[in-house]
Image (cartoon, rainbow, N blue to C red):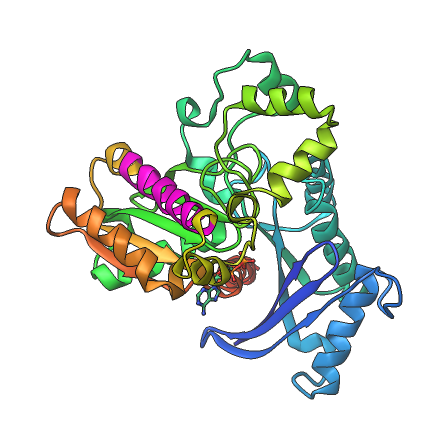
Amino acid sequence: MMKILVVNCGSSSIKYKLYEFPSKSQLSKGIIERIGEEGSKVRNHNQGIKVVINQLLGNKIIKGLEEISVVGHRVVHGGEHFREPTVINGKVIEKIKVNSDLAPLHNPANLAGIMGCKEILPETKQVAVFDTAFYQSIAQHVYMYAIPGQYYKKYGVRKYGFHGTSHQFVAGRAAELLAKPLSEVKLITCHLGNGCSITAIDKGKATDTSMGFTPLEGLMMGTRSGDIDVAAVFHIMKKEKLTVEQMGRILNRESGILGVSGVSNDIRVVKERAAGGDKLSRLALEMFIYRIKKYIGAYFMVLGGADAVCFTAGIGENNEDIVGRLKEDIYKIASPDTKVFVIPTDEELMIAGLTYELAREGSDRK
Ligand code: ADP
């Protein structure tokens, strides 16, 4: 029996869950917010981890630190270094630092959580589970961009893909629902939350995904534009005399469902407005659904058919109308055996499961 602490550090938050394995029971969960913000008592992630541990002790979830067998950390960017979950040591920390260049908002926060745990739980094994690792199976002709090769060599510019842990979790559940081994099925998984991505999975391995070098590529999202002609971006920058940072903010924070509707990034609000006759909200919804349809169609071709198309995350799990429309379109082209599933995602449980496997292997070897 193992108690596994899963830690997911954002730039100003720490989400955690404590599990017991192999029963997979969740013993506790919590979130520390406003880290480093003005007026907050928690100045940094190191302190935040202390708060997490104190909550677990204070609520008598654990009696002592030694009860935590292993910590699993979500790390956003593993670059090309990490193809699977990895036990954290000095070298791994160095590589995560190197990859911070590719995920400047995320990896430093993930690292801060790792360092905090190392300090407070120095004897406890720590494991990194990377969002990008699931996509290291993607073939070179799929992950390369059609630009001069030197930019890949110099700066690692290529498709990496994100949300891997969620897609991997949903794929596992889909195989269970199909009552077939994961190694025998073709799946298209659609993670539709604030961030949105679609992945084509063949025999348990990702073969393509809609997000790219950053999470900006692909579907239209809550506030991200998704695919756009880069020349249009140059044009806007030139006309509005914008810096790279300003344009980046527009594409990442002010576009997508929010940018088109002019109302909200929240699909519930936009649907309500659309139902009331608001034209831009209607347009935002049509665009959102159309893009998903286009990628699903492409991935049917990439995979040569699919056993199931799966929908997950806030939008995918809770909007029967949107999923229903896509389902109709899927049934028009798919084989009669193709299933459409709505599967609630659980990234923390997936991280706990992967961490458990690695910790168990380690203790078997001893
Ligand atoms: P994140 O990517 O930040 O984890 P979520 O997966 O929670 O976000 O997805 C957020 C999106 O899901 C929002 O557009 C929100 O409107 C939608 N959503 C969440 N819950 C519901 C619900 N009960 N009904 C309809 N839409 C929902």
Asked whether 228 or 316 is in front, the reply is 228
Residue lying at 55% horizontally and 38% vertically, measured from the top left: 216
The answer to which image quadrant residue 56 occupies is bottom right
Q: Taking the image as drawn, is residue 174 in sight? A: no
Asked whether 338 or 248 is in front, the reply is 248
Residue 310 % position (x, y): 32, 54
Asked whether 189 or 8 is in front, the reply is 189
The answer to which image quadrant residue 123 occupies is bottom right
Residue lying at 40% horizontally and 22% vertically, measured from the top left: 141
- The number of discs equals 0
Residue 307 % position (x, y): 21, 49
Predominant secondary structure in magenta? helix
Residue lying at 79% horizontally and 62% vertically, measured from the top left: 35
Q: Residue furthest bottom?
A: 60
Up-down relation of residue 31 to residue 62 (above or below)? above
Magenta region, residue range: 281-298
Q: Taking the image as drawn, is residue 59 in sight? A: yes
Residue 162 % position (x, y): 52, 44
Left or right relative to 350: residue 322: left
295 in the magenta segment: yes
Up-down relation of residue 64 to residue 192 (above or below)? below
Residue 326 % position (x, y): 27, 51
Q: Residue furthest front?
A: 277
331 in the magenta segment: no
Left or right relative to 363: residue 345: left
Location of the C terminus by quadrant is bottom right
Up-down relation of residue 339 to residue 107 (above or below)? below
Residue lying at 53% horizontally and 42% vertically, measured from the top left: 132
